Image (cartoon, rainbow, N blue to C red):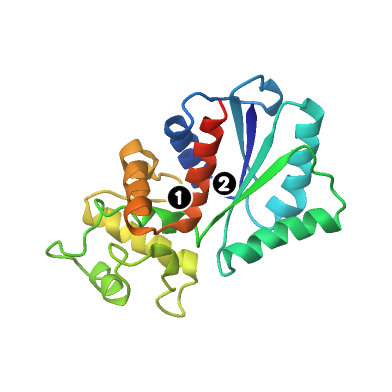
Amino acid sequence: MNIYFLLEGRSTEKKVYGAWLKYLLPEFQRVKSYNDAQDHNYFLISAHGYPSIIHEYIPDAINRIKETGQYQYLVVCLDADEDTVESKKQEIFNFIEESQIELDPIKLIPIIQNRCIETWFLGNCKMFDSRQKNINIPLSEYVSYYDVSIQEPELMGHYNEDYNHAEFHAAYLKEIFKAKNSSYSKKYPRDAQREYYLRELITRIEKQSHLKSLKEFIVFCEFIRSQL
């Protein structure tokens, strides 16, 4: 069994998914080239943004998979941004249908990051607890607007008209990292790649039923392991 991962982001997603898969699918080895897959391998590639991930990279990925005959799953990971999870999924399948692309026997798994991957990262309650003292501005103002240590990060708004959802969620996350004397950027996601960080997000899912779009990715990985 092999898995082809197609990621929207240019930097963060490739680093984070690459790190997380070591913990979630330890039996699988990453290959550098898609045609190197044999068994229990996965391949990661960045589509460098939306909408090219749908209009260009999905057809290319399907052609590659059929060319090799080695992959059973195509996992497409992209941000919901200002749309809903379901509308993004529907956009993918509508494009495939309208383009008359034959998927069979490939199983396409859309993972929609709601609103973006930074939204998931906001769910680590050990990284940030709003009860801690001496929270500086602007983090204190963000917490007054929406406390992600208690409330579901995926339901948070965009604060004001200076931001869209993804921009504000990323800004909030950067302030949380700063409060821990660390830093976060798209290029350097740092602790967000670590196993302990992922485990805290899984705990959030299990205890509070938050991060539903991340849960879809976790459940997929659990399913794959159950098939080995």
**Residue 42: x %, y % from top left:** 60, 30
Q: Nearer the viewer, residue 101 or 32?
A: 101
Residue farthest to the left, as pictured: 133
**Residue 113: x %, y % from top left:** 52, 56
Residue farthest to the right, as pictured: 100
The label shown at residue 12 is: none
Q: Secondary structure at mark 2?
A: loop
The residue at the point 35 percent across, 38 percent down is: 194
Q: Callout 2, which amino acid?
A: Arg
Above or below: residue 49 compared with residue 104: below
Q: On the picture, is 30 further left or further right than 191?
A: right
**Residue 83: x %, y % from top left:** 59, 69
**Residue 44: x %, y % from top left:** 60, 35
Distance, label 2 to label 1, CA atoms, is: 9 Å
The residue at the point 21 percent across, 64 percent down is: 130
Mark 2 / mark 1, whichever is N-terminal:
2
Above or below: residue 60 compared with residue 94: above
The label shown at residue 186 is: 1
Q: Nearer the viewer, residue 181 or 107?
A: 107
Q: Callout 1, which amino acid?
A: Lys
Q: On the picture, is 100 further left or further right than 32?
A: right
The N terminus lies in which quarter of the figure? top right
Crowding at label 1, few (<14), some or many (≥20) Cα neighbours within 10 Å? some
Residue farthest to the bottom, as pictured: 161
Q: Nearer the viewer, residue 163 or 95?
A: 95
In the picture of the structure, the residue carrying the numbered disc 2 is 10
Residue 68, image quadrant: top right
Q: Are marks 2 and 1 in contact (CB under 8 Å)?
A: yes
The residue at the point 28 percent across, 58 percent down is: 176
Residue 63, image quadrant: top right
Above or below: residue 153 compared with residue 62: below
